[in-house]
Image (cartoon, rainbow, N blue to C red):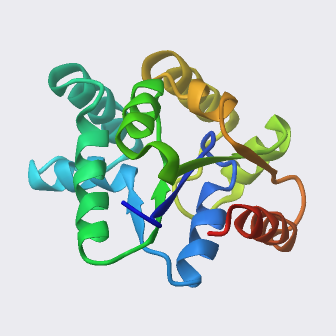
Amino acid sequence: MENVKILAIVGMSGSGKSVVVDYLTSKGYPKVYFGGMILNEMKRRGIEITPDNEKQFREQIREKEGNDWVVKQAIAETKDLIAAGQKRIVLDGVYSWTEYKILKKEFQKALTFIAVIVDKKLRYDRVAKRPVRPFDASAIRERDRSEIENLEKGGPIVIADYYILNNGTIKDVQDNLDKILKEIEF
């Protein structure tokens, strides 16, 4: 894996992970979407995709198949991209401490974690207004609780290599990301 660099983007729901990932993919970097592993498996099994079903399935598959089920799928997809000659890859939505540890072991020095963070009130306001999968305050609080308690989501955010504060504009996020990309020679 010489000269390969992998960015893992982490953050709570509504933090702006998609803004960061979309910017990176617009630059031509391929992404491996962790949530897509869940959605694809739900489709394969004929399960209707709703926020409640997705939450239940995300927790059930980890309970039945292990907390490493999603990350194993993501590692295989990442290795396929590397085998195809990709040198820069974006991992979208690492969820758990288990996934973090497995990725760090698998990709070692090639892997850099960037956490996207935002003040809670602003994040809740943005989630309530977003066009795709909006949540009211009660639903987002429950999702936060579930992701922290059931999926160990806080660990990868806390131990990230870099942080992007997303309290401003999309341009601010992109500028901050560009500084990080330059620093790590991505």
Which residue is pictured at 29% across the width and 49% down the height?
75
Picture coordinates of residue 95 (x, y %)? Answer: 47, 36
Give x and y (percent) for residue 44.
11, 54
> Measuring 47% from the left and 67% from the top, which residue is drawn there?
3
In the image, 7: left or right of 127? left
Left or right of 185 in this view: 50: left
Q: Nearer the viewer, residue 127 or 167?
A: 167
Q: Residue at x 67, y 68 (%)?
A: 185
Quarter residue 151 falls in: top left
Depth check: 17 or 9 in front?
9
Q: Picture quarter containing residue 148?
A: top right
Question: Is residue 58 visible to us here?
Answer: yes
Looking at the picture, tell me which residue is in the foreground, 17 or 56.
17
Q: Quadrant of the N terminus?
A: bottom left
Residue 17 in the image: x percent, y percent? 62, 55
Q: Quadrant of the C terminus?
A: bottom right
The residue closer to the viewer here, 113 or 52, is 113
